[in-house]
């Protein structure tokens, strides 16, 4: 990647089609807004269609809204079955700090939403992708730990933020293993990753704790970036000619704020054996594997 510099100049995107998950608010909506303004055709893949349509009404350009609940594998399959050729899939939807709960498929909800749904969606769409997959992770992956034999928090004491960090580590392992598999079969598709640093979005709004919600909301506003700035690493990873397996985040101290640049990942995120073990377990849980 080029040296760090102020960057917000997303290249023109005419003729290109994007799918952005979790695009009814926050980073996902801002990513969709910029891509559409630059000429892309953008699908807002959202759980709440009415909310998505209200968001889309404020966007200029070629956008459409389709239902996708990434925590529900039936919804993931239905969305994938109805999707034609696309250039870029941006796996953005996520949840953070939830009290323990399970998805309709019986999976712990952080893992279901942040990893397993996107794992299934990506593999189902791979035959129709022409350019790349963007995995939106978090700097929280740096403190994440992951036990492939207890992904669903059935034996360990459940801790909401540990579950979130674990799911973000799963994102990073998925990024690396998917790229390894694509390269091994001679595919020209690339996988990139990104995180938004400290950005004031609504992701902390469902913790069940008013105090944690307020600290998350206003803490990010005090030390972090606007949504427009926080979306830049994702836009960089989605539109610029970066090498496969590049991970983009803000360049500043602790990667909390700044301009897009390649950033570090934890040693666990670089563990190929852990990545392969996670992949195998994810296939078992979702019933979806690497195509062909």
Image (cartoon, helix red, strand yellow):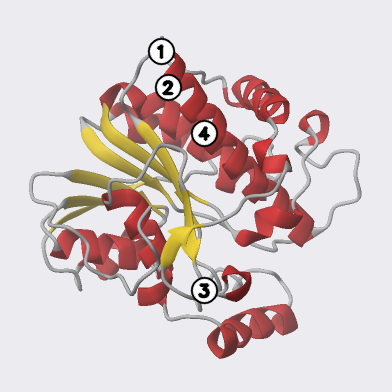
Residue 18, relative to residue 234: is it above or below? above
Q: Secondary structure at mark 4?
A: helix
Q: Which x, y percent locates residue 139? A: 62, 60
Q: CA distance from mark 1 to mark 2?
A: 5 Å
Q: CA distance from mark 3 to mark 1?
A: 39 Å
Q: Secondary structure at mark 2?
A: helix
Residue shown at 83%/57% (left/top)?
159
Dot 1 and dot 2 residues touching (CB under 8 Å):
yes
Residue shown at 40%/67% (left/top)?
4
In-image side of 128 versus 224 (left or right): left
In the drawing, what numbered circle is on residue 185? 1
Dot 4 and dot 2 residues touching (CB under 8 Å):
no
Name the mark nearer the viewer: 4 or 2. Answer: 2
In-image side of 147 versus 186 (left or right): right
Q: Which x, y percent locates residue 141? A: 67, 53
Q: Which x, y percent locates residue 234? A: 39, 58
In the picture of the structure, the residue carrying the numbered disc 4 is 119
In the drawing, what numbered circle is on residue 275? none
Between 246 and 1, the residue placed more toward the observer is: 1
For the question of whether residue 279 can be seen, the reply is yes
Residue furthest top in the image? 292
N-terminal-most mark, 4 or 2: 4
Q: Secondary structure at mark 1?
A: loop
In the picture of the structure, the residue carrying the numbered disc 2 is 182
Residue shown at 37%/52% (left/top)?
237
Q: CA distance from mark 3 to mark 4?
A: 24 Å
Residue 8, relative to residue 156: is it above or below? below
Dot 1 and dot 4 residues touching (CB under 8 Å):
no
Q: CA distance from mark 4 to mark 2?
A: 14 Å
In the picture of the structure, the residue carrying the numbered disc 3 is 202
């Amino acid at each position: 990647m080029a040296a760090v510099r102020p960057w917000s100049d997303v290249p023109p995107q005419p003729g290109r089609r994007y799918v952005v998950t979790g695009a009814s608010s926050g980073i996902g909506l801002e990513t969709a807004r910029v891509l559409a303004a630059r000429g892309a055709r953008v699908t807002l893949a959202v759980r709440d269609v009415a909310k998505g349509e209200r968001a889309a009404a404020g966007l200029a350009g070629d956008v459409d809204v389709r239902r996708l609940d990434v925590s529900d594998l039936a919804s993931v399959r239905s969305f994938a079955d109805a999707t034609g050729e696309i250039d870029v899939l941006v796996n953005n939807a996520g949840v953070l700090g939830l009290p323990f709960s399970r998805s309709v498929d019986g999976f712990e909800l952080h893992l279901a939403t942040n990893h397993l749904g996107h794992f299934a969606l990506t593999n189902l769409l791979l035959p129709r992708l022409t350019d790349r997959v963007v995995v939106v992770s978090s700097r929280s992956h740096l403190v994440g730990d992951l036990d492939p034999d207890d992904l669903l928090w059935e034996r360990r004491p459940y801790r909401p933020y540990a579950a979130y960090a674990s799911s973000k580590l799963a994102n990073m392992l998925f990024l690396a293993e998917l790229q390894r598999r694509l390269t091994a079969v001679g595919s020209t598709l690339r996988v990139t990753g990104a995180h938004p640093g400290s950005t004031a979005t609504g992701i902390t709004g469902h913790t069940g704790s008013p105090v944690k919600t307020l600290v998350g909301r206003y803490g990010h506003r005090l030390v972090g970036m606007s949504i427009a700035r926080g979306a830049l690493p994702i836009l960089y990873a989605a539109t610029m000619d970066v090498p496969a397996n590049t991970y983009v985040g803000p360049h500043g101290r602790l990667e909390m704020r700044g301009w897009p640049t390649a950033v570090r990942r934890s040693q666990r995120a670089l563990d190929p054996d852990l990545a392969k073990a996670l992949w195998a377990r994810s296939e078992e849980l979702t019933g979806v594997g690497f195509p062909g």
